[in-house]
Amino acid sequence: GAVVSQHPSWVICKSGTSVKIECRSLDFQATTMFWYRQFPKQSLMLMATSNEGSKATYEQGVEKDKFLINHASLTLSTLTVTSAHPEDSSFYICSAMPSREGRETQYFGPGTRLLVL
Amino acid sequence: GESVGLHLPTLSVQEGDNSIINCAYSNSASDYFIWYKQESGKGPQFIIDIRSNMDKRQGQRVTVLLNKTVKHLSLQIAATQPGDSAVYFCAEKPGGYQKVTFGTGTKLQVIP
């Protein structure tokens, strides 16, 4: 149980284009999902908290107009990197927190590697 | 805070030996702690967690120790196996908040 998927697993795009990454909780409902970014040999940095049916909460320094988050259902959150540039190349990882009361553990997706040329 | 190191601390352990990975956390208000394992190119995988009202918790081949006095967390892996080779992250969560903060990570290399 507690499986989270991401799609695509990797993507290469041209500078200036937009890329959408999907995060799905496959066998549980998640009111809250999180989006992280990870550069090589570094830790995970939280970008934003995605809440179903409401606006995402962005961490300081993360541009909300550049990283659009939509959490339209209890099993799906999407991250759109708009007007991507080479410096946006990174490993993007989502996590989902089960909606059941008392659960605090986040379950992570396999990550999406983005390369912007 | 942001991790600034480009070189992860590395722990090399002989296969079959026990491993101890340490983590110093920063927030005194944190009341929930988690250890994650991340293999190359994959997302983090939950290993074990512990709440601040405990100082020790055991799982299968793993033990987490929590010392709130010095804000220190450790992960012990018994009889380390090649499949344990990965980067290990500790994470902390303050009470009343949903988001967790990840530590810088330690790379575990198991020598066959």
Image: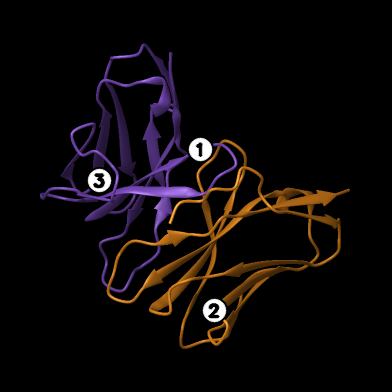
Chain colours: A purple, B orange
Relative depth, front residue between B11 and A3:
B11
Instruction: Please say if the residues under marks 1 and 3 sit with CB atoms less than 8 Å apart.
Output: no
Give the quadrant of residue B97.
bottom left
Relative depth, front residue between A81 and A11:
A81
Give the SS element for disc 3.
Answer: loop
Q: Give the left or right position of residue B81, taking residue A27 as reference.
A: right
**Crowding at mark 3 (Cα within 10 Å: few <14, some 14-19, many 20+):** many
Q: Residue at x 59, y 74 (%)?
A: B73
- Vertical position of residue B25 compared to residue B1: above or below: below
Q: Position of residue A28 (x, y in %)?
A: 31, 53
Q: CA distance from mark 2 to mark 3?
A: 35 Å
- Vertical position of residue A100 compared to residue B39: above or below: below
**Crowding at mark 1 (Cα within 10 Å: few <14, some 14-19, many 20+):** some
What residue is shown with label 2?
B71
User: From this viewpoint, is residue A85 visible?
Assistant: yes
Which amino acid type is marked by label 2? Lys
Asked if both marks, 2 and 3, belong to the same chain, the answer given is no
Q: Position of residue A36 (x, y in %)?
A: 39, 45
Which amino acid type is marked by label 3? Thr
- Vertical position of residue B65 compared to residue B93: above or below: below
* Badge number at residue A39: 1
Give the SS element for disc 1.
Answer: loop
Q: Give the mark nearest the N terminus, 1 or 3.
A: 1
Instruction: State which chain disc 1 sits on.
Output: A
Q: Give the left or right position of residue A33, taking residue B105 as reference.
A: left
Q: CA distance from mark 1 to mark 2?
A: 26 Å
